[in-house]
Image (cartoon, rainbow, N blue to C red):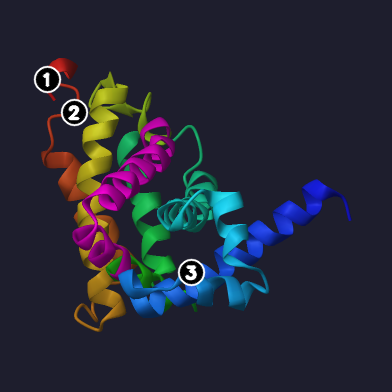
Amino acid sequence: MSRAEARERNRRALLDAAFQVVSRDGYRARLDEIAERAGLTTGAVYSLFGSKNGLIVALVADYLRPYYDDVERAVPAGLELLEAVDAFARYYRRTCDAPDARSGLSLQITLLDMALHDPDLGAQLAASVRSQETHLIALFSGRSHRGGVVTPPQAHRLTTALRALFTGLGQGVTLGLAPDADEQFFADTARALVSEMSLVDRDADAL
């Protein structure tokens, strides 16, 4: 095994171990336990990620990356905006039924708790999520809507609104608080949100 391959193997082992420990313990998660689960030392954490916070930020990026890749496949090019939002909503609802939905929700809540206890980590996590959301902004930009074309600033505004909507609905489904929120409900709610937003009738700089 090459040095690069060994480094990637160790990185993967630490991320997997961090997911388990952080989901359970939150800001109380200990680096020594994470390293032990990965079969490594705490020195490997500092070597690969720089710090505990660096590991947590990398964990978030690693967790979100396949999600955004799947979204891009679920929402093909060529759809107008409402159709794209409909496809995105249906995809998001399907993720609520995935085998790892509860562990994913646990991680989300845990990371929020950690961010509240450590403002510096919170700022890093917010920056990481914003970086990943550029995929969604690009996904919605350039699509036709009401005789116009969605600009990147407008797509950014839309992405913020959809994230808030789907996070709330997704948590409700996973916790059993929204038993009737099926794919059609998600799609109808998202389309209604977009229909009420002034995406192309206002100057982009005012969004």
Residue reaching furthest to the front: 43
Q: CA distance from mark 3 to mark 2?
A: 46 Å
Q: Amino acid at mark 3?
A: Leu
Point out residue 125 in the picture as x, y percentages from the top left corner: 33, 49
- For the point 37% across and 41% down, the residue is 133
Q: Are marks 3 and 2 in contact (CB under 8 Å)?
A: no
Q: Amino acid at mark 1?
A: Arg
- For the point 33% across and 45% down, the residue is 124
Whether 134 is among the magenta residues is: yes
- For the point 38% across and 23% down, the residue is 142
Residue 101 in view in this figure: no
Q: Over which residues does the magenta segment extend?
A: 110-138
Q: Establish if 142 lies above or below 58.
A: above
Residue 23 vs residue 168, the one in the foreground = 23
Q: CA distance from mark 1 to mark 3?
A: 49 Å
Which quarter of the figure has residue 168?
bottom left
The quadrant in which the C terminus is found is top left
- For the point 60% across and 77% down, the residue is 36
Number of other residues with Cα within 10 Å of mark 3, as a class: few under 14, some 14 to 19, many 20 or more: many
The quadrant in which the N terminus is found is bottom right
Point out residue 113 in the picture as x, y percentages from the top left corner: 24, 67
The first of marks 3 and 2 along the sequence is 3
Task: Report the side of 140 relative to 120 (left or right).
Answer: right
- Determine which residue is flagged by label 3: 31
SS class of the residue under badge 3? helix
Picture disc at residue 153: none
Which one is closest to the eye, mark 1 or mark 3?
3
Q: Establish if 172 lies above or below 75.
A: below
Q: Are marks 1 and 2 in contact (CB under 8 Å)?
A: yes
Picture disc at residue 202: 1
